[in-house]
Amino acid sequence: MRAVFYQQVKPWDDETDLEAMEKCVRSIEMDGLLWGQGKLIPVGYGIKKLQISCVIEDDKVSTDDIEDKIVGFEDHVSLSWNQIRSYLCEVSVY
C-alpha cells in the first residue's frame, strides 16, 4: 500500500540556508520513496519551516527511517516530523 504525507522540517534559525536544507532532504533516495512539492511556511521570528510532500510504499519505507535521515543533516535541521497521512488504494476492475 502507498501512503502520502507531509514531512515538516524545521531549521536551526532564520540564518539557515533553506534551499540547501531542501536539497539535503531531496537527496534522500530510497526504493519506494518519491518526493513531491515543497513549500516554506512561516513559524515565527523570521523562521520558516519546509513542508514537503512525499509518497511512500509502506512495505519498503518507514517514516521513522526518513525522519532519522533528515535530522542527520545537523548543519541545517533542528527538528523533523510528519503529518496528514492518507493511503492510496489501488482498485482493480474486473
Image (cartoon, rainbow, N blue to C red):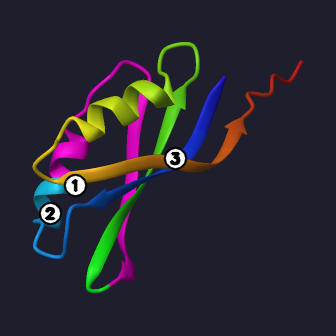
Up the image or down, 43 lies above or below 71; here it is: below
Mark 1 residue element: helix
> Residue 11, position in %: x, y?
24, 61
Up the image or down, 14 lies above or below 65; here it is: below
Residue 19, disc: 2
- The residue depicted at 17 percent of the width and 55 percent of the height is 21
Up the image or down, 9 lies above or below 56; here it is: below
Q: Earlier in the sequence, mark 3 or mark 1?
A: 1
Residue type at mark 3 is Asn
The quarter holding residue 35 reads top left
The quarter holding residue 15 reads bottom left
Distance of mark 2 from mark 1, alpha carbons?
Answer: 5 Å
Which of the two discs, 3 and 1, sits closer to the camera? 3
The magenta-colored residue range is 22-44
Distance of mark 3 from mark 1, alpha carbons?
Answer: 15 Å
Mark 3 residue element: strand
Viewer-nearest residue: 8 or 14 = 14
> Residue 69, position in %: x, y?
28, 31
The image quadrant where one finds the N terminus is: top right
Is 14 left, or right, of 56 in this rendering? Answer: left
Residue type at mark 2 is Glu
Viewer-nearest residue: 31 or 5 = 5
Residue 82, disc: 3
On the image, numbered disc 1 is attached to which residue?
22
- The residue depicted at 73 percent of the width and 27 percent of the height is 90
Mark 2 residue element: helix
Residue farthest along the right direction in this orientation:
94
Viewer-nearest residue: 68 or 57 = 68
